Image: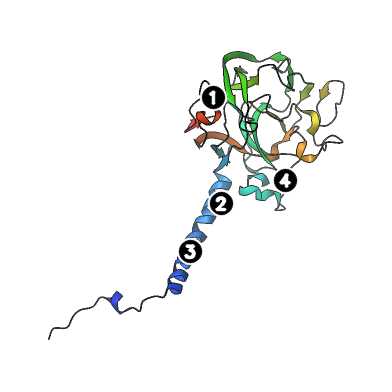
Amino acid sequence: MTDVATSPDEDKPRLTLKQTVIKELREWGVTLSVFVPLFLLFSGLVYELRVIPSESMVPNLQVGDRVAVNKFAYGYSRNSLPFSFGRYIPLPDGRVFASQPERGDVAVFEHPHTPRVMIKRIVGIPGDEIQLVNSQIYLNGEPIDRELVRRIRYVEHSKQQPVTALEYREDTGDENWLSHSFEGGGLYGNTVTFIVPEGHFFFMGDNRDNSLDARNVSGHCRESSPGVIDEAGCPPRPGVRLEDASVGFVPFNNLIGRADTVLFTTYRCSRGAAEPCMKNRWLRGL
């Protein structure tokens, strides 16, 4: 008679369902123990993904855009930690490998008064004087260039009602960007003069009539002289709830990173009934 050869695997006892589950869980545990630290390191030091939840940055960012945030652009602070862990870990203030933001950058930052992450555009850097007159930005006493590009009609995501906006190209000489203003004007078309303190920045949303930003005085100190706000670090104005306060002047330490690219999006022109359709939102630089 001829012996039948058997493979080593055939000699092993079959695993029960429970043993199979435990084995798979153990292997997943090993995989995650390697992957999770690498992911946290990457999102803390290199890039992280942020989802746009509101229309404050229309037309440049839409609800549903997934944005790559450059974490090394401005150096690192406690707010650079992923998932906003910096709110809860007692790390010292300050930044390492600091690099100064530039006017025109779209930046992600921690709200100075509430535990919220915001994304808006840096319009004023330390020492700048910012004022709006009839919705026109005055930078250091001079109006920036502003050119009407087109009129656009769309349905607001938050209110589900149609609006008509005027789309402008604004140009400081070094940087330019698009902004929206509703026909008929908005609440913050005329402001006091803001003088940006050292170590702080003045942020605005590109959707000018749908953004609670540094133009609103509720998150600022009171005027140091008639028509001038130039101090930072005050709590919200009396009677203003923390969750309703504007960002005021944002400290450098609160910056998380620079928004560089829209990687992909769930936004569709059909959802917003946009006429004409807003620009392509896949792999688009900001």
Q: How is the image coloured?
A: rainbow
Q: CA distance from mark 3 to mark 1?
A: 48 Å
Question: Mark 4 — residue?
Answer: 93
Among the 4 quarters of the image, the one containing residue 128: top right
> Which residue is the extreme one toward the front?
161
Question: Mark 2 — residue?
Answer: 40
Which is more foreground, mark 3 or mark 1?
1
Left or right: residue 36 versus residue 235 is: left
Left or right: residue 9 versus residue 168 is: left
Q: Amino acid at mark 1?
A: Ala
Which is more foreground, mark 4 or mark 1?
1
Q: Nearer the viewer, residue 54 or 50?
A: 54
Q: CA distance from mark 2 to mark 4?
A: 21 Å
Q: Is the residue marked by circle 2 packed among few (<14), some (14-19), or many (20+) residues within 10 Å? A: some
Label of residue 274 in the image: 1
Residue plotted at (77% across, 21% down): 191
Q: CA distance from mark 3 to mark 4?
A: 35 Å
Mark with earlier residue (2, 3)? 3
